[in-house]
Image (cartoon, grey):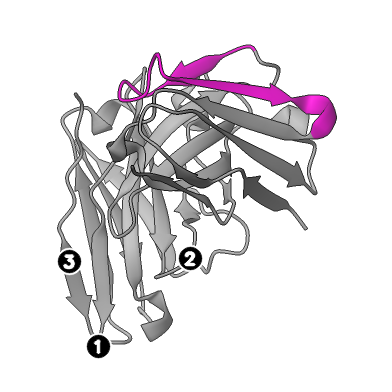
Amino acid sequence: SYEVTQPPSVSVSPGQTASITCSGDRLGDTYTCWYQQKPGQSPILVIYQSTRRPSGIPERFSGSSAGNTATLTISGAQTLDEADYYCQAWDGSSVVFGGGTRLNVL
Amino acid sequence: EVEVVESGGGLVQPGRSLRLSCVVSGLTFSDYAMHWVRQVPGKGLEWVSGIGSKNDHIAYAESVKGRVTISRDNAKNSIFLQMNSLRLEDTAFYYCARGGQLMLLAADWYFALWGRGALVTVSS
């Protein structure tokens, strides 16, 4: 089955830029989405169609895609951005989620 | 304000059945595909099933194919997930989520709005 890979954790200091990657051998042929999930809460869509930001999501969240790697960038990360982040794609027949990346802002 | 509310979770024995429901308010329900996504507590996300806005397209994950049936009632702004032959590994929070407007384009395969989830526990 198709898989996408994320790093288990990323750490940044407040105000720094955090980058979370998602890699898969067919990501270049589809769109990637990103979700934020804080403990005890439901996921929130923060990026869809690889680069688009839903209304209400702060501008510091951005998405990009190059080759078979998609990247979620949080510019000027804040402590409230500490959460698990999941990438997701559709391979033409099924949905695949990455294993999640714990973002530590400390 | 858009609201997504799941119900029907609970404790069920292996091999038995359970039906989850999801009611959506605050949007034109019949304009959007709807999906079920599950999450074992403390683990990652797994898509389960999706249904097109007009019941025109249905898809299932391989892990549940043949055991679950998704349906929707646009008159009641609701979707359902009938789960049969439940297994221990089906234990999870089941989230209802609003998708894009279609299910035929990669651009529409995202989950924009999520409910709070319904916990299904399969145990003897």
Question: What amino acid type is highlighted by mark number 3?
Answer: Ser
Pointer 3 residue? A9
Q: Can residue A74 be seen in this view?
A: no
- Tell me which label, 3 or 2, sits earlier in the chain: 3
> Which mark is on residue A20?
none
Q: Is mark 1 on a helix, strand or loop?
A: loop
What is the C-alpha distance between the residues marked 1 and 2?
A: 21 Å
Q: In which quarter of the image is the C terminus of chain A?
A: bottom left
**Foreground: disc 3 or disc 2:** 2
Mark 1 residue crowding within 10 angstroms, few (<14) / some (14–19) / many (20+): few
Q: In which quarter of the image is the N terminus of chain A?
A: top left
Pointer 1 residue? A106
Query: Residue drawn at (41%, 19%), measured in percent from left and top?
Result: B67
Of residues A70 and B86, which is closer to you in this image? Answer: B86
What is the C-alpha distance between the residues marked 3 and 1?
A: 13 Å
Considering only vertical position in the picture, is A32 above or below B103? below
Question: What amino acid type is highlighted by mark number 1?
Answer: Leu
Which residues make up the magenta segment?
B56-76
